[in-house]
Image (cartoon, rainbow, N blue to C red):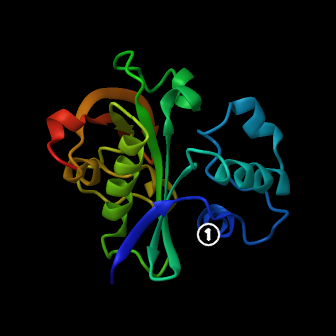
Amino acid sequence: MVIEIRPATVFEDISTMVGPKRPDATVCWCLSYRIPSTLNLALRGPERGALVRELAAQDPAPGVLAYDGDDVVGWAAVHPRAATSFARNRRIPRVDDSDVWSIWCIRVRPGHRGQGISHHLLSGAVQFALDHGAPAIEGYPVDNQGRKVDLTMAYVGTRALFERAGFTESAVTSSVINGFPRLLMRYEPDQAGEH
């Protein structure tokens, strides 16, 4: 298996990873942190997919996708923090005034989990952000101390996943997911070595 990470510009592939089974269903579409909360609550059903289609046509793309050959097998959301709801999030503090990018969702398609794809996604999301001028990249994973995280909440990643990608803890947050505290972890290119 050779995993290739590409910018998320193909709407149908994004839909495979984060869209609903029924086109009229209201699901996250990985928009809950990407857009203001008032807009997130207002968008219903197909309107959400329509917005994602617009985002996929913009530069930068709304994230990256993992491919095994022609099959899309994973998704990671990455964008400048200032243009996400993390810019105003009281539970996840700002460490400094740097124009950091945020990675907030890593998803691997069922049937492809346990093959290291999340590591490829995180590495690819970091490279995507660096290629777009990010001075640093943040993630907000759970500190699960090796305990199992419910799959529906595992999208934020784990401390171990981010540590293996060269991220270090920058702050403890007051955010909790699935009973686990979330950390603010940061990747600084000059401190992490080559990427």
Quadrant holding the N terminus: bottom left
Q: Quadrant of residue 154?
A: bottom left
Q: Quadrant of residue 135?
A: top left
User: In the displayed structure, would residue 23 be above or below residue 57?
Assistant: below
In terms of depth relative to the viewer, which is nearer, 30 or 55? 55
Residue 89 appears in the rendering: no
Indicate the position of residue 43 as horizontal and vertical percent values.
81, 44
* Left or right: where 93 falls relative to 39: left
Seen at 20% across and 46% down, the residue is: 166
Residue type, numbered disc 1: Asp
User: In the displayed structure, would residue 154 be above or below residue 142?
Assistant: below
* Left or right: where 87 falls relative to 142: right
Label 1: few (<14), some or many (≥20) within 10 Å?
Answer: some
* Left or right: where 121 falls relative to 146: right
Label 1: which residue? Answer: 13
* Left or right: where 170 falls relative to 137: left
Indicate the position of residue 35 as horizontal and vertical percent values.
66, 36
Indicate the position of residue 4 as horizontal and vertical percent values.
39, 71
Residue 150 appears in the rendering: yes
Seen at 53% across and 24% down, the residue is: 87
Indicate the position of residue 174 as horizontal and vertical percent values.
41, 27
Tell me the element at label 1: helix
Number of numbered labels in the structure image: 1
Seen at 28% across and 57% down, the residue is: 147
